Image (cartoon, rainbow, N blue to C red):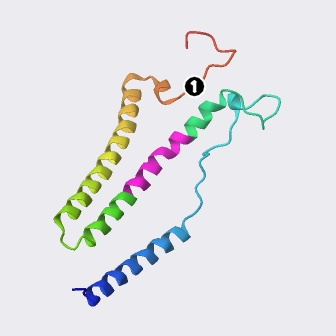
């Protein structure tokens, strides 16, 4: 049988959580991928609006700077969706198990991304080699070997 009171309760919970989520999204400030303006080898010496081939290193630095933030946001969304799936599973053990696996995958992905960042920083600190964390495309004036 269809339980109207139960479905009304679930719909009310979804409406409250949805409005809280929409309020959060509406109040969020814009995020810009470029963390700093390009200068030096990334732009032409004659015209600062023209990028050089070394501009890829600036682009990659900006993308990697936002990578951990995106991983965190995706993990958070995965956990929220899995929590909704657990709430709406109605006691179905298969749905609960799928949601638990989704939460586990989100946490493992976050741990792997953070540990990769931490390991690179530890290698850089212990060896004193700071170029591990800096991606660089050699220009025509660069002497080989790097």
| Residue 124 at x, y percent in the picture | 41, 28
Q: How many marks?
A: 1
The prevailing secondary structure element of the residues shown in magenta is helix
- Residue 22 sits above or below residue 29 on the image: below
- Residue 14 sits above or below residue 117 on the image: below
Q: Check the picture and name the quadrant holding the N terminus.
A: bottom left
As rendered, which of 88 and 53 lies closer to the eye?
Answer: 88
Residue pictured at 35% horizontal, 48% vertical: 110
Q: Is residue 67 magenta?
A: yes
Residue holding disc 1:
136
Residue pictured at 31% horizontal, 81% vertical: 10
**Magenta span covers which residues?**
63-76
Residue pictured at 59% horizontal, 9% vertical: 144
Residue pictured at 39% horizontal, 76% vertical: 17
| Residue 121 at x, y percent in the picture | 40, 33
Q: Would residue 35 be found to the left or right of residue 19 on screen?
A: right
Q: Secondary structure at mark 1?
A: loop
Q: Would residue 49 be found to the left or right of residue 63 on screen?
A: right
As rendered, which of 82 and 23 lies closer to the eye?
Answer: 82
Q: Residue furthest front?
A: 1
Q: Quadrant of residue 136?
A: top right
| Residue 106 at x, y percent in the picture | 32, 52
């Amino acid at each position: 049988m269809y339980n109207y009171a139960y479905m009304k309760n679930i719909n009310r919970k979804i409406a409250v959580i949805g409005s809280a989520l929409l309020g959060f999204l509406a109040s969020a400030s814009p995020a810009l991928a470029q963390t700093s303006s390009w200068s030096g080898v990334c732009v032409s010496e004659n015209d600062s609006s023209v990028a050089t081939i070394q501009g890829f290193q600036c682009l990659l630095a900006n993308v990697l700077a936002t990578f951990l933030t995106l991983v965190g946001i995706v993990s958070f969304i995965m956990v929220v969706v899995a929590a909704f799936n657990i709430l709406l599973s109605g006691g179905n053990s298969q749905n609960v198990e799928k949601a638990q696996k989704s939460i586990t995958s989100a946490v493992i992905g976050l741990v792997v991304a953070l540990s990769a960042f931490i390991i690179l920083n530890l290698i850089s600190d212990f060896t004193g080699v700071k170029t591990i964390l800096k991606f660089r495309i050699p220009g025509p004036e660069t002497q080989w070997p790097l």
